[in-house]
Image: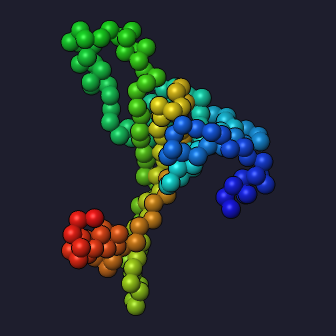
Amino acid sequence: MARSVAKKRRWIAIKTTNVLVNEDELPAPITVAGHYSTRRVAFTSGGVLAILDLADPTVLARVKGIEIGADPNPMIEATIASGRATPEEIEAAKNSRKFLGERTLVDRTALPAAGERFGTHTVIGRNMSTLTSHPGKTLYGCSYRIEPIDEDCRSLWVTKLAERRQRSGPV
C-alpha cells in the first residue's frame, strides 16, 4: 500500500545498501531547515528524514538546538595533543565520523482513563544523523515513538516480555 501511494505521488524508490532505511526521490525539490533543498527522503522504522548534501551536520545541529549524542571534540583534541594525528589528518577523516543527535519536541504521557487498560507515552523528536551508507550527506527530520503504558507508567511491552520470561524462561 505504501509503495502504491508513493507511485501515485511520482516518487521513485532508490536502492540502498542500508537495510534500516527506505529511500525515495521526489519529483520536485523540497526545502527543509530553512534553506536546504533536496529531492531525496528516507524512511526509518520511526520517522521520515530529508537527505541533505551536508557533510558536516554540527553547524545545522547547533542552529536547530539539536544535542549531539556524543561530542567527538574532546577526543579529537586529545588525539591531536598526544601527537597520534595531525589536525589535517583529523580533517581528512571528518566525513567518516558518525553523528547522531536529537532534540525532543514533544514528550507527553497520557495515563489510562477510568476503565481503560493502557495509556501512552509519546515522544516526537527532531533528528539528525550521518550514515556510512550515505557519505557526505546528513539526514534531517523527525522521529515518532508511541509506547503503551500501564497505570504506573510502565511500558506494556517490557511488562509483557517480563511475564513471558517468568512463564517460559529467557526469550
Determine the residue positioned at 48% across, 26% down: 56
Looking at the image, which residue is at 67% across and 58% down? 2
Q: Position of residue 45 (x, y in %)?
A: 50, 54
Residue drawn 30% across the image and 20% down it: 76
Against 147, is 101 above or below? above
User: In the picture shown, does residue 70 fall above or below 111?
Assistant: above
Measuring 53% from the left and 26% from the top, which residue is drawn there? Answer: 136
Residue 143 in sight from this viewpoint: yes
For residue 27, which quarter of the picture?
top right
Left or right of 36 on screen, residue 94: left
In the image: residue 121, left or right of residue 137: left
Q: Position of residue 5 (x, y in %)?
A: 73, 57
Residues 46 and 7: in front is: 7
- Residue 34 in sight: no
As drawn, 169 above or below 144 = below
The C terminus: image quadrant:
bottom left
Q: Nearer the viewer, residue 117 or 168?
A: 168
> Which percent across, then down, holds residue 33?
59, 40
Which quadrant is home to the N terminus? bottom right
- Relative to 118, is 40 on the left or the right? right
In the image, 96 versus 70, the foreground residue is 96
The image's colour scheme reads rainbow
